[in-house]
Image: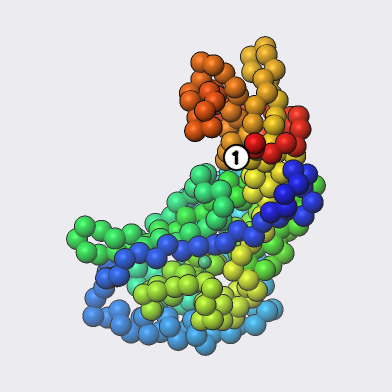
Amino acid sequence: MNSSPVAHSTRASVTLSIEDGPEGFKLKTTTAGHGEARHALARVLLTSDPGPARIERWTGDIGRRLLLASRHVRERNFTRIHVEDLSLLFAAYDERFLNGLCGELLGRDGPAFRLSGRMTRAAGKTTRLQHPDGTSSFEIAVATSVLFDGFLADDPAVTVCGLPCRDRLEALQRVLEHEIVHLAEWLCWEVSHCGRARFQGIASRLFLHRAHTHQLITRSERAAKLGVKVGTRVSFRYRDRRLTGRVNRITKRATVLVDDPAGELWPDGRRYVRYYVPLGKLRPVSARPWS
Ligand SMILES: [Zn+2]
């Protein structure tokens, strides 16, 4: 990141990640018949090559289907989304791109889905969940914070997986496609790394992905645009007073430390009271860094 508090070109690349769990992976629904399905899925992953025209048509159809079927995602720059929308998208992708083989391998329940308002760096994450009985299942999480932070007026172009996205729906689809490749790799080979050639080959053939990072506006970038970052001296209104302090942390809001003899003692020997302030309410008062 640039050290200036004024945003120039501060778009961070945010890595889409998968958590690698401990070894000993075993599918929840493993039965004798699944060897074949796994083999078939591996063949699709390694050889299917629909080509750009078909991929664009298929993914466009899937997006439109979501808009028609969803009770929450009603417009391309949607402001609401429900976890069942992820499940719907996943089923459509599995059917169209992977011959329904993920669903077959995972059983009726499929993977679990989660919408996270707290993931502020990664846009998506596939996690293998290990159960006490030794079986595993999967969870795909999508960061609503990262999606909803982008696509506001005057925001720079958004790129996900190396592909420019015109709206939130496109960004969501690219994020989910990436996670689907992780899940499918896990199902076939019990390991998945998006930095590796096999993953990138699959993501490129099936979904035209060019990269495994995305560029969305994250909260800290938005804050940087306002001239606020960790260490910035800021002022803000609290009740009827204007307080001045320093930004200590930026998540959904900024944590601002304000000198106060009644506050808690910090390692720098001073006492501060912490305020959680929405970013838009902060006014930078100077660019002095932490001393
Ligand atoms: Zn990844």
Asked if residue 89 can be seen in this view, the reply is: no
Farthest residue to the top: give it.
240
Q: Tell me the quarter of the picture where residue 290 sits.
A: top right
Farthest residue to the left: give it.
133
- Which residue does the numbered mark 1 point to in the structure image? 250
Q: Could you tell me the amino acid type at mark 1?
A: Ile
Asked if residue 258 can be seen in this view, the reply is: yes
Q: What's the colour scheme?
A: rainbow
Viewed as shown, does residue 3 lie left or right of 78?
right
Name which residue lies at 60% across and 58% down. 14
Label 1 Cα crowd, 10 Å radius (few <14 / some 14-19 / many 20+): many
Using the image as rendered, state which of residue 141 and residue 255 is in the foreground.
255
- The image quadrant where one finds the C terminus is top right
Q: Tell me the quarter of the picture where residue 280 sits.
A: top right
Using the image as rendered, state which of residue 249 and residue 55 is in the foreground.
249
Against 51, residue 213 (above or below) is: above
Against 274, residue 37 (above or below) is: below
Against 28, residue 254 (above or below) is: above
Using the image as rendered, state which of residue 247 and residue 174 is in the foreground.
247
Secondary structure at numbered mark 1: strand
Name which residue lies at 53% across and 23% down. 271
